[in-house]
Image (cartoon, rainbow, N blue to C red):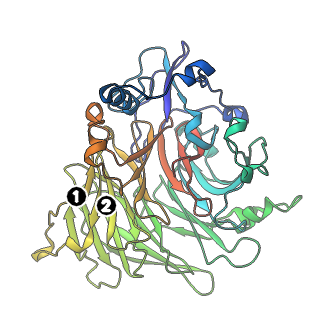
């Protein structure tokens, strides 16, 4: 959550970013940018005031009025779509709402990032935390040779400092440290539109073979084996050879046509990659038993516009979904000899930008569109039509809270009621679909009808583009945008 504060030197608010758009360059300011000062310290009542704060003798109307005041949104809380920053105002995070919060500036913005699983264990809840990731830069056109694929290690990510009386005994072992970002860079000659990592099953110590696929603005897709780069973080004095930073595969099937859609299959350990471009074509590339790669040059076709997103099914090895600016979502069977979709649904009146398949409930698919609406679909309600025409079923849930395009949507890895959404209004929101207001609670929400009860948390991040749940740190989110990287964990998830 964020609050407004006055700042005479604050720049004008930046516009949201759509796929492929380049943000203005943001100079790196180093780790100092990770520290926040709480300008909203708690005020405590005197002992006499506390003693007088009972409810004895007060009429019900007075107590109900107090309860209603407590339910109203703090006027200093910034809510996109309802509030706008005035000239000279900027936003400061409400630190009491975070368990962890770190922001890191980069020389060039990275509009795509992916979290890499590590060997530090699952279900980690102690601090300081460590995160590994891969990201791709978007340098200015005049300086394209400065682009790189970044292999990242973020360590020393401390828990937010709390008042002594709020600390739990179980947290006494948590250390307060300075966050550190280490990077291993792989030179690129073009911007990265989308990056995704793939690993085989984690076994034993060290990193398994880790592949990073980068979809370039040039139309090529480069696959790198970043295993040695990850291992070098924990091997002091190790030196990477130039050959270790060369692509293991260059996919040229898109013939210099730019693309944004990219996804590895979670069910094929050796590695199977989907790639889609602005001409509507989708290709598959498979890693062979010998470690090579083979691309099927016969594309899947049917979209009448850009393939904005691709998502493999988490439960069926041959099924995947696609989203397009032709306003449709399509379901495909990779075994189809016709290379046509088996289901097609008109999911929006605008571009459908992003998709996410539930990890826990295989028939649930979330989508985000250009009009700021994100929705949840039950695939069991989708029916094929004659001639491949698009059907128009209704979503099981739809939210229009965001007023700018949705740029990312992702289900929580272990809870199919929790969803992460990023949008062009500079916010990343967390949602709990299991929340429903009862009649008593509804009495106190009369002033906030445009804030759905399922909205769990709003995180402000300048020009945010993507966010991902960390699979091994419950509730932790790793995000990227025009101003750098963010790692946070709220007290509510």
Q: Is residue 135 above or below residue 21?
A: below
Q: Residue at the spot x=40%, y=60% of the render? A: 417
Please tell me which residue lies in front, 7 or 168. Answer: 168
Q: How many marks?
A: 2
Relative to 449, residue 321 above or below:
below
- Is residue 422 rendered to the left or right of residue 136? left
Instruction: Check disc 1 and report the residue beneath it.
Output: 347
Q: In the image, residue 358 lies at what x, y percent?
A: 40, 67
Q: Is residue 29 above or below residue 187?
A: above
Label 2 to label 1: alpha-carbon separation: 9 Å
> What residue do we see at 74% from left, 78% from top?
204
Tell me residue 85's x, y (percent).
41, 21
Which mark's residue is nearer the viewer, 2 or 1?
1
Q: Quadrant of residue 342?
A: bottom left
**Residue 367 x/y as whole percent:** 32, 57
Above or below 383: residue 478: above
Quadrant of the image occupied by residue 94: top right
Mark linked to residue 33 = none
Classify mark 2: residues with Cα within 10 Å, few (<14), some (14-19) or many (20+): many
Q: Are marks 2 and 1 in contact (CB under 8 Å)?
A: yes
Nearer to us in this view, 247 or 317: 317
- Label 1 secondary element: loop
Other-residue count near label 1 (Cα within 10 Å), few / some / many at <14 / 14–19 / ≥20? many
Q: Position of residue 201 (x, y in %)?
A: 62, 78
Q: Is residue 95 left or right of residue 258?
A: right
Say what secondary structure mark 2 lies in. strand
Residue 323 numbered tag: 2
């Amino acid at each position: 959550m964020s609050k407004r504060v006055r700042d005479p030197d604050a720049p004008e608010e930046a516009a949201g970013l759509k796929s492929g758009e380049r943000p203005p360059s943001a100079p790196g300011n180093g780790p100092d940018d990770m520290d926040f000062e709480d300008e909203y310290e708690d005020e405590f009542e005197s002992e006499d005031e506390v003693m007088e704060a009972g409810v004895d003798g007060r009429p019900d109307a007075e107590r109900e009025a107090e309860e209603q005041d407590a339910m109203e949104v703090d006027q200093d809380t910034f809510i996109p779509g309802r509030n706008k920053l005035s000239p000279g105002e900027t936003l400061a995070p409400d630190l009491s709402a975070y368990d962890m919060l770190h922001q890191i500036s980069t020389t060039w913005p990275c509009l795509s990032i992916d979290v890499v699983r590590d060997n530090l264990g699952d279900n980690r809840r102690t601090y300081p935390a460590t995160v590994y990731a891969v990201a791709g830069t978007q340098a200015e056109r005049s300086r394209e040779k400065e682009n790189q694929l970044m292999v990242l290690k973020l360590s020393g990510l401390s828990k937010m400092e709390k008042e002594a009386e709020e600390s739990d005994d179980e947290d006494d072992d948590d250390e307060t440290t300075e966050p550190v970002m280490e990077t291993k860079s792989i030179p690129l000659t073009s911007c990265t539109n989308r990056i995704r990592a793939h690993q085989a099953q984690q076994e034993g110590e060290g990193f398994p073979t880790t592949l990073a696929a980068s979809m370039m603005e040039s139309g090529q897709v480069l696959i790198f084996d970043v295993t040695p780069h990850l291992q070098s973080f924990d091997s002091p004095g190790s030196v990477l050879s130039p050959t270790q930073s060369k692509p293991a595969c260059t996919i040229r099937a898109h013939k210099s046509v730019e693309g944004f859609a990219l996804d590895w299959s979670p069910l094929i350990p050796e590695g199977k990659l989907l790639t889609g471009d602005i001409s509507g074509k989708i290709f598959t590339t498979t890693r062979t038993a010998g470690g090579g790669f083979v691309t099927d040059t016969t594309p899947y076709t049917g979209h009448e516009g850009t393939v904005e997103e691709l998502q493999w099914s988490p439960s069926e090895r041959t099924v995947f979904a696609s989203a397009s600016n032709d306003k449709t979502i399509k379901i495909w069977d990779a075994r189809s000899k016709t290379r046509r979709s088996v289901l097609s649904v008109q999911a929006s009146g605008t571009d459908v930008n992003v998709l996410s398949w539930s990890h826990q409930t295989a028939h649930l698919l979330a989508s985000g569109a250009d009009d700021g609406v994100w929705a949840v679909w039950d695939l069991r309600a989708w029916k094929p039509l004659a001639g491949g025409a698009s059907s128009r079923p209704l979503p099981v849930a739809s939210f229009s809270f965001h007023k700018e395009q949705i740029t990312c949507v992702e289900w929580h890895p272990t809870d199919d009621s929790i969803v992460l959404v990023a949008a062009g209004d500079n916010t990343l929101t967390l949602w709990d679909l299991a929340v429903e207001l009862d009649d008593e609670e509804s009495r106190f929400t009369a002033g906030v009808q445009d804030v759905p009860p399922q909205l769990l948390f709003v995180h402000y991040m300048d020009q945010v583009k993507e966010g991902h749940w960390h699979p091994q740190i419950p509730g932790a989110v790793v995000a990227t945008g025009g101003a750098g990287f963010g790692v946070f964990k709220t007290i509510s998830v």
